[in-house]
Amino acid sequence: MFTIEHEFDATVITLVDEGETPLREDVTVQAFDSEITLEQWDPRTDQVAKITLSPVQLRDLAAALNLPEGIYRSAP
């Protein structure tokens, strides 16, 4: 399951793990004009883990999910 919310300066997507146990914490994706952040609560450290991607990195990640093993360079 996931939700999408449009805020003033970002689109926020929350991914909810509904599969078999053990379940993972929700993942929040915030898409801004210049960066995309992914956040997930880590109960082991009692902190939020955060990853920041550029729009190009996100595009490459999306493309990589559908490609076979190898080394690729995206077009500028």
Image: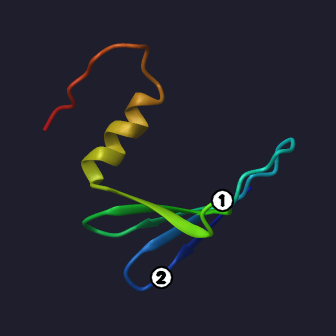
Residue 42: quadrant of the picture = bottom right
Judge whether 9 appears above or below 58 on screen.
below
Judge whether 73 appears above or below 34 on screen.
above
Tell me, yes or no, whether the two marked residues, 1 and 2, touch with CB atoms within 8 Å.
Answer: no
**Residue 45, image x, y percentages:** 60, 63
N-term-proximal mark, 1 vs 2: 2
Residue 44: quadrant of the picture = bottom right
Judge whether 34 appears above or below 19 on screen.
below
Query: As shown in the figure, which amino acid type bears the numbered disc 1?
Result: Arg
Residue at image point 33% right, 13% down: 70
Residue farthest to the left, as pictured? 76
Q: Which residue corresponds to mark 1?
A: 44
Structural crowding at the residue carrying mark 1, measured as other residues with C-alpha within 10 Å and reported as few (<14), some (14–19) or many (≥20) = few
**Residue 1, image x, y percentages:** 74, 55
Instruction: Tell me the quarter of the image containing the C terminus.
Output: top left
Colouring scheme applied when the structure was drawn: rainbow
> Relative to residue 75, is residue 35 drawn left or right?
right
For the residue labelled by badge 2, is the local secondary structure a helix, a strand or a loop?
A: loop
**Residue 25, image x, y percentages:** 70, 59
Q: Which mark is residue 14?
A: none
Residue at image point 79% right, 50% down: 23
Query: As shown in the figure, which amino acid type bears the numbered disc 2?
Result: Glu
Structural crowding at the residue carrying mark 2, measured as other residues with C-alpha within 10 Å and reported as few (<14), some (14–19) or many (≥20) = few
Residue 61: quadrant of the picture = top left
Residue farthest to the right, as pictured? 20
Residue at image point 48% right, 82% down: 7
Residue farthest to the front, as pictured? 45
Residue toward you, 14 or 45: 45
Q: Which residue corresponds to mark 2?
A: 7
